[in-house]
Image (spheres, helix red, strand yellow):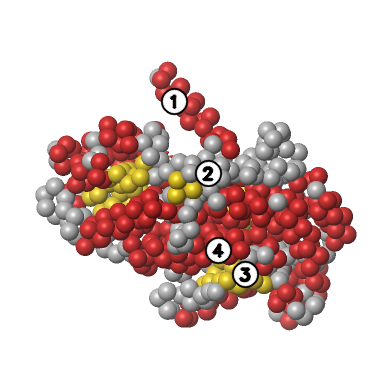
Amino acid sequence: MALPNNNPTQTIAWQQLTDHFNEIKDIKIQDLYKHDDRQKDFSLTLNDLSVDFSKNRITSETIKLLVDLAKEIGLQEAIESQFNGEVINVTENRAVLHTALRSNSEDPVLVEGKNIKPQIQTALRKIRSFSNKVISGKWKGYTGKSITDIVNIGIGGSDLGPDMIVESLQYYKNHLNTHFVSNVDGDHVSEIMKRLDPETTLFVIVSKTFTTQETITNAETLKNWFLKSATIFDIPKHFVAVSTNLVAVDNFGIDKANVFTMWNWVGGRFSLWSAVGLSISLSVGFENYKALLDGAEEMDIHFRNESFETNIPVILALLSVWYNNFYGAETEAVLPYSQYLKKLPDYLQQAIMESNGKGVDRNGDKIDYQTGTIVWGSTGTNMQHAFMQLVHQGTKLIPADFIGYKESLYGLTDHHKKLMANYYGQIDALAFGKTKEDVHLELQVSGNADKINTLLPFKVFEGNRPSNAILFDKLTPKSLGKLVAFYEHKIFTQGIIWNIYSYDQFGVELGKELAKKLLKKQ
Ligand code: G6Q
C-alpha cells in the first residue's frame, strides 16, 4: 500500500487546530501550571525513559486535536507500510528498513518477495566475529603486530552516525583508538595520518555507493600513505569496506572476504544499525553494539504498537508540528546534559534536515505550508554560558529538548547534582521566567533599590518558553539506541504529516554534480 497522500492543511483536524490555536495562542505555561496534575497528565514513560512535556503551550484539547490530525492523515497505516518493507521511498524506488536491522523477532520482512532477516543475521555474525578478532589482537597487521587504531573513512550517513555513537559511548570503549576521516579537505586526513602507524592501523572504508568523491579521495590518500611502507599484498590485512558496490570495492583492491554488505533498503543517514556501524562494534565491542540495536528495537516496538496519545515519538513529533506550523517557530534546540552527547546535534541536523527539508509534497506539488524545522544545539552546561541568552530573552520562540540522565557514569555525585540542578533550572527558567515583582524584590533585597528604575526591564524573563524533559536513568548503549530511534521515528511521523518524502535527498546532489563539473574544467 502506498503512503497516504493528504495535504495536512486540508484536513478537518487542521481546521480545528487552527480554531483552537486562535483561541489559546496567548496562553501562558505559568497559568497552565496552576493546575495540580499537569506534570502527571503530560508525562510519558518507557522503562528507563521518562518524557515530561508539561512545559508546552498546550492543553489536553491540543493533544487530542493533534492526535486527530495524525489519525486523519493515516499515520498508523504509514507506520505499518514502513515496518512491512513497502516501497515508501518512492522517488528512489526503495523500501526503508532500518527497523528490520535491529529486530529480534522471527517474523519475516519481505523485500521483493524475499525475507531479509537471514541476511541481516549473517551480517551481524560477520561483524561480531571480525570485531572479536581485532579487539582480541588475533587479527594481525602485515608485520605481525595487533591492531591499535581504526580509521573510519566515510562522509554524511557513513560518518556522522558511527562518529556520534563512538563519541557518546566513550565510557564503554576498549583499547582501540578510533578516528573518523570525512572532509575532502586534505588537512583533515593529514592530521589523522600524523597519529597513525601503518603496521597497526585498520582502515574501514564506508561508502554505500563507493563513488563518493570525499571518501574515495581520502581512501586513496590513505592507501598511498600505507603503501609507502607496505606492499599491495598487505592491503587485505589493513583495509576493509562497507558497501553495496562490490565491483568498485574490488577495483580498489579490497579482498572479497573483507567486504561487509549494505543494502539499498537502508538509507545512509539511518545506516548506523547496519555494517556502517562496524567502527562502533570495533570500538565498544559487539555486545555493546548489539545492546544499542536492542535499545532501538524497544523504541520501534513502542512506536509501532503504542496508541498515539501515549506514543513518545508521535507526541513529540506532533508538538514540533504545533510550534512549526501554528506558532511559526523556525528552529528547535537539542540540548543534552551530557558531555558524551556533544555530537548528537550534528548527527540530528543531518537526520532531521536532510529528511524533512523538502518543499514539494508527495504529489510533486510545491508546498504552501512549513515543513522541516532547523535543528541545532550543544551540551549543557556549556551552552548556558553561550547561546542560551537568546533562548531565554531573545525575540524568537525556540522549543527545546533537554536530554538528561539520572545517574552519571563515573559517579562524581557532586558534579552530577550540579549538572542536574542546571538541567531543571534552565527548564524552569524558560517556562516560568522571572516577573517584574520578583526582580523588584530582588533588587531591593540586594541593596540596589536605587537601580530599580533603570535595571528592571532588562532583568525580567517573560518565560512561557516551551521545552521537553527527556530523562533516562543512565547513558548506556541500550538507552542511546532508544534515544536515536526516538528521533528517527519523530522524523518519520513529521514527514508523514507534512506529506513529503523523507527518505530522498536530491537537494544535496546538485552540489556534488557542480563540484564534479568544476573539477573537470580545472
Ligand atoms: C544520507 C545521504 C548521504 C550519504 C553520503 C555518503 O542519507 O545519502 O549523507 O550517506 O553522501 O554516501 P556513501 O555512503 O555512498 O559514500
Q: Earlier in the sequence, mark 2 or mark 4?
A: 2
Closer to us: 498 or 429: 498
Between marks 2 and 4, how big is the CA–CA gap? 19 Å
Q: Position of residue 325 (x, y in %)?
A: 75, 50
Quarter of image, ligand 1: top left
Q: Earlier in the sequence, mark 1 or mark 2?
A: 2
Q: Which mark is residue 301?
A: 4
Q: Earlier in the sequence, mark 3 or mark 4?
A: 3
Mark 4 lies on a secondary structure that is helix
Q: Earlier in the sequence, mark 2 or mark 3?
A: 3
Residue at position x 14%, y 47% in the image = 142
Residue at position x 29%, y 44% in the image = 259
Q: Which mark is residue 516?
A: 1
Q: Are marks 2 and 4 in contact (CB under 8 Å)?
A: no
Q: Earlier in the sequence, mark 1 or mark 3?
A: 3
Identified by mark 3, the residue type is Val
Q: Nearer the viewer, mark 1 or mark 4?
A: 4
Task: Confirm whether residue 346 shows in the render.
Answer: no
Identified by mark 1, the residue type is Lys
Identified by mark 2, the residue type is Ala
Residue assigned mark 2: 95
